[in-house]
Image (cartoon, grey):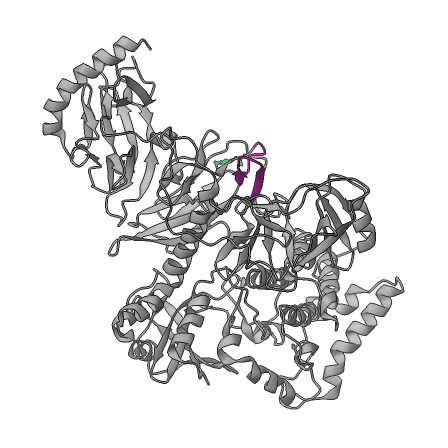
Amino acid sequence: MAHQTVVSSSKLTFFFMFVFSLCFATANTLNRGSSLSVKNAHSDLLTSPDKSFTCGFYGVPGRNAYWFSIWFTNSKDQTVVWMANRDRPVGLESRVSLRRDGSMVLTNHVDVTTIIWETGTGSTGVDRAQLLNSGNLVLKDPNGTILWRSFDFPTDTLLPNQPFTKSSTLVSNLGRGNFGAGYFNFYFDNDNVLKLMYNGPDISSLYWPDLDYSVFQNGRNAYNSSRIAVLDELGSFSSSDELQFSAIDMGSRVKRRLTLDYDGNLRLYSLNSSTGLWVITWQAMAAPCKVHGICGRNGICVYTPAPRCSCPPGYEVADASNLNLGCKPKFKRTCSKSQEEKFVQIPQVNFYGFDLNFSVAISIDDCRQLCLGDCRCEAFSYRLNGEGWCYTKSALFNGYKSPDFVGSIYLRMPVSLSVHTSKPQYSNASIPCKTNGPAMYGTTGKRVRWVYLYSFAFAVGAVEFLFIVSGWWLLFRRHGSAVTPVEDGYRVISSQFRRFRFNELKSATKNFQEELGRGASGSVYKGVLEDERVVAVKKLADIHQGEDVFWAEVSTIGKINHMNLVRIWGFCSEDEHRLLVSEFVENGSLDKHLFTSNLLGWKERYKVALGIAKGLAYLHHECLEWVIHCDVKPENILLDSDFEPKIADFGLAKLTQRDRLISMFSQIRGTKGYMAPEWAMNLRITAKVDVYSYGVLILEIVKGIRLTSWLLEDIEEEQEAELTKFVREAKRKIQRGEELLIEDVADPRLEGQFSRNQAAKMVKIGIACVEEDRSKRPTMDSVVKSLLECEDESYIHSSH
Ligand SMILES: *[C@@H]1O[C@H](CO)[C@@H](O)[C@H](O)[C@H]1NC(C)=O
């Protein structure tokens, strides 16, 4: 466009601005020839007819920087949902004008007018700009036809009814309050599947959906190329790749947004209209350290328990003044034969990607030799999964530490370098979270050093997560401002998890009338809350912790949300009363369907086995804080109306104290029940105790009888022998290569109506899970994976 045109039309609009800004302040329409200016940022606003959205110049106080934006009028921090110039903030002299030719133009008028952004709608007949109730800024012609809309150019947020198409990408912000385009992308990939990708200056790396599974196993479909997705008013998202999820508070009249946050997580939020704060109602990544790219080259993401970045031994922070540029080696990498090299092992740490080579079934020495023989190899990863998986690595990215990663990374470095591996490995080099930082955009508005990305990502990701969802903030407030628990107690912590009054629960359960069950940790009663939700109220027995500890523990449980785990709605802690309020699950516990005349069909059995495995895998591998259940048994598995299993009583182990479980164990004299042998051996309890219990359970699901009977009143030696005998027999046959006749194993009541493949797989998994040596048991993640391999068997083979 010729330069002169720009200047002259800007003079014109200058005149019109005076006229129109008087008439149209806080209107929802901007007419042709008028403009909004930064100078009048407070009054030059467009507001949607229902007032929920505002469009205008969004500025950060104390900084001469403005963005032409749309934001939620009523959220506390006026959350921005769209920006025209995210990477190029403008100064006080700027304005956005709807020019006479129909184009909307953002100009930066200092000495020479420069166009910062424009809609490209010149000579299309655009007559006015309007902000709609949906949060969509549209340009219309005199007939009302929409010729341009902001919905087609999302930044980091998708609003209800905003179509997400093959040409849309959500790009995260760089940091909190730093609106520049960051490094995380949400988009339809070439295979038609919605993905999350880290797209940084050094590398690009996909991290969602889970790369260990196929498209199909992740519940997606790669064959529908229409590439369209939408979040509806009720909070339900659905996509042509069959990704589907819903807000936990599904329903109308809630303001929602789906945002790709600057910590790389995609989250669905609901606005709490009374506080103006956002509540997370769904998120893509349960484990924040599994987001790729967050800790830079050589960095490792660790939970402390909030996620943060750290450097491995032999490495140091790359840039001390900027803290978060990843880590650099303290040695020079050479590949000369004269330099002697060693490998430093860091257990439970993995780096994703950049594999030079992957070998199965080789010894660790061979793996080491493979790495030494390749100049490019910086480290190797060796997995102790019984097969010896060896990966040699040419670069170290996407590092994370997880107690459930059964393997180590071995870093290659010169022998002469002394490293301390015995001390807390990360503390010296760790990268602290920062809660605020220097101005985060350059004057040119270019991308800023990606440093800020993760300090902010972590500080705020963690803060949002812990404070909003878990309600820990209440705890802090209590300490900070001496508000009594009673005053605080009835505040809704999130839309889901709250504190209840004892009287409220007493009347909900009609004075604890209908007992649903009774277990070691207490009795459970059915109740109906005032909002007509049916709930299960558990009176916890023998809780001796102080209120604060109890509070912290239950809020940990309260933030756990998975379809195969019973949802905890809240708790009560008053005087000596300690109660938990959870969802009521219709069909009762698994034992009532497995060991009685209520015959459970095969399809349901398989679904139950898979669901329990998913729930446990979530507890072990995905939660912010790993949870070991410690009491997996059919009585603790509830079935909903679709026979989808839900695990109850998780997270109670910490509350009721391990000692009690151990003493329970000694009371059961010689019968192991569902409890792993290490309970008796005074070993540190790991997630593998749940794997053991799961093994017993899955075998019982196939056989339809109890293999252990310590729950029964009189303990018979024979009953105990059942499990041992069965496992010994089966193993012997498998070792000898004999067919394990699945017909003989499966529940005879099924009368042959079951899938041989699935049953055989389940028996195999069960046997592996009840290994005495816990290191030989699989992890729950791998159990889920192998069950999914035969998920789609048709299960009726009536004749052959
Ligand atoms: C593809 O996805 C769209 C949107 O979800 C849906 O309407 C359409 O029916 C799908 N097409 C096929 C062939 O399944």
Q: Is 199 included in the stretch rendered in magenta? A: yes
Whether residue 308 is situated above or below residue 33 in the rendered picture: below
Of the pair 619 and 742, the residue shown nearer to us: 619
Of the pair 602 and 349, the residue shown nearer to us: 349
Please give the name of the residue rendered at 49% of the width and 63% of the height, measured from the top-left corner.
641
Whether residue 111 is situated above or below residue 310 in the rendered picture: above
Q: Position of residue 341 (x, y in %)?
A: 77, 49
Q: Is residue 437 visible?
A: yes
Please give the name of the residue rendered at 64% of the width and 75% of the height, measured from the top-left corner.
684
Name, please, the residue furthest toward the right: 736
Left or right of 2, for residue 411: right
Of the pair 610 and 126, the residue shown nearer to us: 126
In the rendered image, which quarter contains the C terminus? bottom right
Whether residue 333 is situated above or below residue 424 in the rendered picture: above
In the rendered image, which quarter contains the N terminus? top left
Give the magenta part as a residue range. Answer: 190-207
Please give the name of the residue rendered at 81% of the width and 53% of the height, measured from the top-left corner.
361
Q: Position of residue 375 (x, y in %)?
A: 76, 39
Count all numbered tags in the image, as a single digit.
0
Q: Position of residue 734 (x, y in %)?
A: 84, 64
Left or right of 99, for residue 286: right
Q: Position of residue 786 (x, y in %)?
A: 69, 55
Q: Is 159 included in the stretch rendered in magenta? A: no
Left or right of 243, for residue 484: left
Q: Is residue 118 visible?
A: no
Whether residue 574 is situated above or below residue 262 in the rendered picture: below
